[in-house]
Image: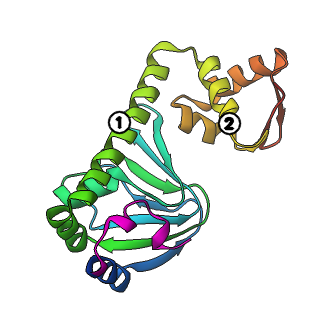
Amino acid sequence: MTLEDFEFYEELSDNEKEVLSENVKPITLDAGVTLFYQGDITEDILLLLEGEVRVYIQGEGINEITLYSLSPSEQCIVNTTSTINRVPTIGSAVTTTPIRAFMINRDIIDDFMSNNNNYQKYIFSLLMLRLDSVARVLESVKFKQLDERLYDWIQNQDSALITITHEELANVIGSTRVVVSRNLKKLEKEGLINLLRGKIERIK
């Protein structure tokens, strides 16, 4: 995967493409690396080439709630908003797998935002997409029982065999390990899943 795979790339002028390619900084990171913490002001913008990044919020005295996961050829709107506007991030970001990415300096993105209407439209469309993701998270937390939320999450995974600990899943869902374990046992008794060591197998 390269810069050409990002949706905004074709909207750049030839000069902007040249500036971008000459100034991106390639990085590789292992799983479990925190890219930024909630409240940081980020200096550069991440363009993800390979792997996955989880963006989450954490209030004082409560568990984490995942806002969304960043996939290859995507740009993080929490990171972008903080970098462009020089404001604290509303959440934290951590690599859930090893990643390969590009980092772009704030000055370059500032120039694109000021001079390229198509890039502005890309950023606004990205913002609307993530707002929709956050709205669905909030709706799920407010209106669904935890066992429903767990099963919805399990159903939405690409593989029927999911490698995740109960504690990690609790962080994704926004609960505690004990409560998640209890509700997973309930789903298992209902014949919907199998619980294995460090894994969850989806049956239905």
From the viewer's perspective, tell me whether residue 21 is left or right of residue 196.
left
Give the left or right position of residue 109, taking residue 77 as reference. Answer: left
Q: Earlier in the sequence, mark 2 or mark 1?
A: 1
| Cα gap from disc 2 to disc 1, whole angstroms | 27 Å
Magenta span covers which residues?
A: 1-14
Q: Residue at x 20, y 73 (%)?
A: 107
The x, y position of residue 159, in whole percent, is 76, 43
- At x 59%, y 23%, the residue is 149
- State the residue in front, 49 or 37: 49
Locate residue 4 relative to residue 81 in the image: left or right: right
Residue 166 disc label: 2
> Can residue 47 be seen from the camera position used here?
yes
Residue drawn at the location 29% of the way across and 82% of the way down: 19
Residue 109 sits in quarter: bottom left
> At numbered mark 2, what does the secondary structure look like: helix, strand or loop?
helix
* For discs 2 and 1, the disc positioned in front in the rendered view: 1
Mark 2 residue type: His
Determine crowd level at label 1: few under 14, some 14-19, many 20+ residues with C-alpha closer than 10 A: some
Q: Position of residue 127 (x, y in %)?
A: 32, 44
Q: Which quarter of the image is occupied by the C terminus? A: top right
Coloring applied to the structure: rainbow
Local secondary structure at mark 1: helix
Q: Which residue is tagged 1?
A: 131
Please tell me the numbered disc located at residue 5. none
Q: Position of residue 92 (x, y in %)?
A: 39, 50
Q: Compared with residue 35, is residue 21 higher up or lower down, i.e. above or below? A: below
Viewer can see residue 41: no
Q: Give the amino acid type for the residue marked by disc 1 in the picture.
A: Leu
Q: Are marks 2 and 1 in contact (CB under 8 Å)?
A: no
